[in-house]
Amino acid sequence: MTTESIIDSTPLFECRAETRISASPLEIYSVVSDLRRSSEWSPECRGGEWIGEPAAVGSVFRGENLRSEDVVAWAPLVRGTWYTEARVVAAEPGRTFRWVMLTHARENQESLWGFDIEPAGDGTSVLTHHFRMGHATEGIHKIVTGLDEDGRRRFVHDWSAKLVDDLDVTLARIKAVIEKSEKSGR
């Protein structure tokens, strides 16, 4: 009898969070689509460089990341500095910016990150940050290779909680960056 692993679930991860920001959709878009600035808000990404036109559909962003020892500390994760590549799949100024994580062979994976922006009136907008992983990425498969099914379930549970927290932290930091620059008149 073959039993399916939790890692074969689809979607494996799916989460979203939103916040209201005192700025126009275009002002917010100009910040969130500039992934080079991600060190200002991302819990792990320290910035990086564009391969192709910045923030354009089809362009690739090579991100530099830093993960501390305490992130899901028990799991066999990459720690310290590591690099990722992502391809922009949607770039509609003032509306949406989305990217998929790439394999080492630069193929799209079912790992989609994005921001959606909607005007909310009174000079504010709602920024939604979302993540969806359909099938497990090559990185997830590497992480869980040596884990039994209980370990895999624990990893999916703990990683889900980390993702939810990351979205909340990211939005709070983006809100602070944008509203601070609006107050200072930048």
Image (cartoon, helix red, strand yellow):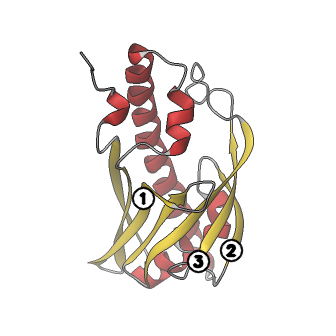
For image coordinates 53% across by 26% down, the residue present is 145
Query: Given the image, on which type of amino acid does mark 1 rest?
Result: Leu
What's the distance in space between the residues labelled 3 and 1, CA to CA? Answer: 15 Å
Distance Cα–Cα, label 1 vs label 2:
18 Å
What's the residue type where badge 2 is placed?
Answer: Trp
Circle 2: element type: strand
Q: Position of residue 73 (x, y in %)?
A: 60, 22
154 w.r.t. 159: above or below: above
Circles 2 and 3 in contact, beta carbons < 8 Å: yes
Amino acid at circle 3? Ser
Residue 87 falls in which quadrant of the image?
bottom right
How would you rate the neighbour count of disc 3 (Cα within 10 Å): few for under 14, some for 14-19, many for 20 or more? some
Look at mark 3 in the image and give the residue it sits on.
59
From the top left corner, tell me how far across and down residue 65 is, in percent.
69, 50
Up-down relation of residue 168 to residue 130 (above or below): above
State which tag comes first along the sequence, 2 or 3: 2
**Quarter assignment of residue 69:** top right
Q: Is residue 152 left or right of residue 5?
A: right
In-front residue for pair 178/31 = 31
Disc assigned to residue 42: none
On residue 112, the disc is 1
Residue located 34% across and 58% down the image: 18
Give the residue at mark 2. 50
The image quadrant where one finds the C terminus is bottom right
Q: CA distance from mark 2 to mark 3?
A: 7 Å
Q: Residues within 10 Å of mark 1 (few under 14, many from 20)?
A: many
Residue at image position (62%, 31%) is 77
- Image position, residue 171 (x, y; %): 46, 56
